[in-house]
Image (cartoon, grey):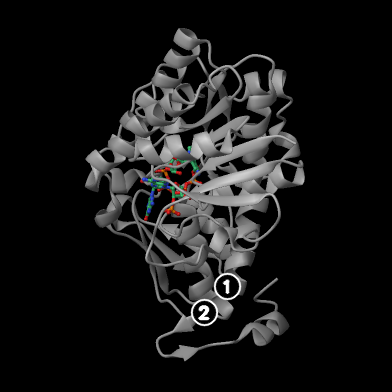
Amino acid sequence: MKTALITGVTGQDGSFLAELLLSKGYDVHGTIRRSSVDFRERIAHLEGRPHFHLHYADMGDSMSLCQVVKNVVPDEIYNLAAQSHVQVSFDSPEFTADVDATGVLRVLEAVRLCGLEKSCRIYQASTSELYGKVEEVPQNENTPFHPYSPYAVAKLYGFWIVKEYREAYNMFCCSGILFNHESERRGETFVTRKITLAAARIAQGKQDKLYLGNLSSLRDWGYAKDYVECMWKILQHDQPEDFVIATGVQHSVREFCYLAFKRAGIELEFVGEGADEKGIDKNTGKILVEVSPDFYRPTDVVNLWGDPTKAKEKLGWDPTKMTSFEELVNLMVDADMEKVAVERVGDHVRTNLAEYLEKGIVK
Ligand code: NAP
Ligand code: F7E
């Protein structure tokens, strides 16, 4: 039985990866942070299961990381823990650098200090944000990096320190340069989830309007559950190498919004431009989506589009066999329609699920 350690197991990707590794017969260990709230929604269904173990550690605390690595003696480490929100990295740049940049160094050094550098394989959660102010489209492993946020700059350090340890100490450590991947477990302030939740709430009369930032921003969006399989494949490859993981298809925030509202039963028409653009309900004429400059970023990455050819050739990653963009939008909206149907609004718990199922609002 192989032993895996996942930092950031409570996150979107960590929870899917834990499920995947358990299904492959791994002994899975995850790190959690001490928090005033004990409920860990994404992994609640795994807690208490045999072969699933939790340990306290913080990416800012090398002693806690060394302790966990020493106790677990992992065959594989998946370093997913990060301050992962780009906008937040402008508000907390130093914290982001400590966790997302120096934190990677702490994990690598913990492995070395525990004498596991020959036996332990390490996956680093790198990101398409490294391409930032893009210098070519689509982006592959040879595209120059141009990070465009404190988050991206911190992740660039993580990318290079992994490469350095691979070459200097012959360690099996690799970066997956993953393009955006979403799911029904996505954090609620990332644009996709913000849209699917709002579409569900508006369709069920629990929200009036959705305010967004740059509607023209382009992303290569995939499904997180498909992407964690690639993390595992990268560590099973015969050589330690870095890989771009993407669908190879690009869509705008506006398109995501249109499809999400459509799935929730509302057809939108977008009129106007820039900050004056609005999404109007074709049926009622009501303005449901507006642009608020509050959601503009000091520097925004607007043209991400991945070329996953290398992953296709070497890992057998075939995005055409994965969840499509439309399927992704639909599964996220469907999950949020159910969630919102039993959501607390003000002082009332509205349990309208049966009614919505009957009317076909929830599919
Ligand atoms: P996420 O949902 O935000 O999860 C982040 C995880 O990191 C959570 O478990 C969080 O713990 C943990 N964490 C944050 N700060 C920490 C600290 N100081 N010490 C220990 N743990 C800490 O992110 P995700 O979407 O699953 O992404 C996973 C990784 O992939 C991240 O490194 C992200 O930057 C990277 N990435 C994501 C995407 C994407 O599209 N999702 C694309 C490329 C790369 P709490 O639950 O306690 O907050
Ligand atoms: O923004 C625009 C925003 O916050 C996507 C992280 O997982 O993927 C994620 O980073 C785009 C940006 O994700 C709103 O300006 C418009 O252009 O969903 P997001 P992200 O910044 O791409 C990468 C690969 C990671 O590595 C990160 O960890 O959408 N946008 N209006 C908005 N974005 C947000 N959040 N909110 C809006 O209202």
Is residue 212 placed above or below 313 in the rendered structure?
A: below
**Residue at numbered disc 2:** 343
Q: Which mark is residue 146?
A: none
Cα separation between marks 1 and 2: 6 Å
- Residue 38 % position (x, y): 46, 66
The image quadrant of residue 100 is: top left
Q: Nearer the viewer, residue 2 or 250?
A: 2
Q: Please report the residue visible at 52 percent of the width from the left and 18 percent of the height from the top.
A: 141
Left or right: residue 230 versus residue 291 is right
Which residue sits at x=65%, y=23%? 311
**Image coordinates for residue 151, horizontal then vertical, percent:** 33, 37
Check disc 1 and give the amino acid type: Lys
- Ligand 2 under 8 Å from disc 2 Cβ: no
Identified at 65% across, 61% down, the residue is 48
Pointer 1: what residue? 339
Q: Position of residue 217 (x, y in %)?
A: 41, 42
Residue 157 x/y as whole percent: 35, 24
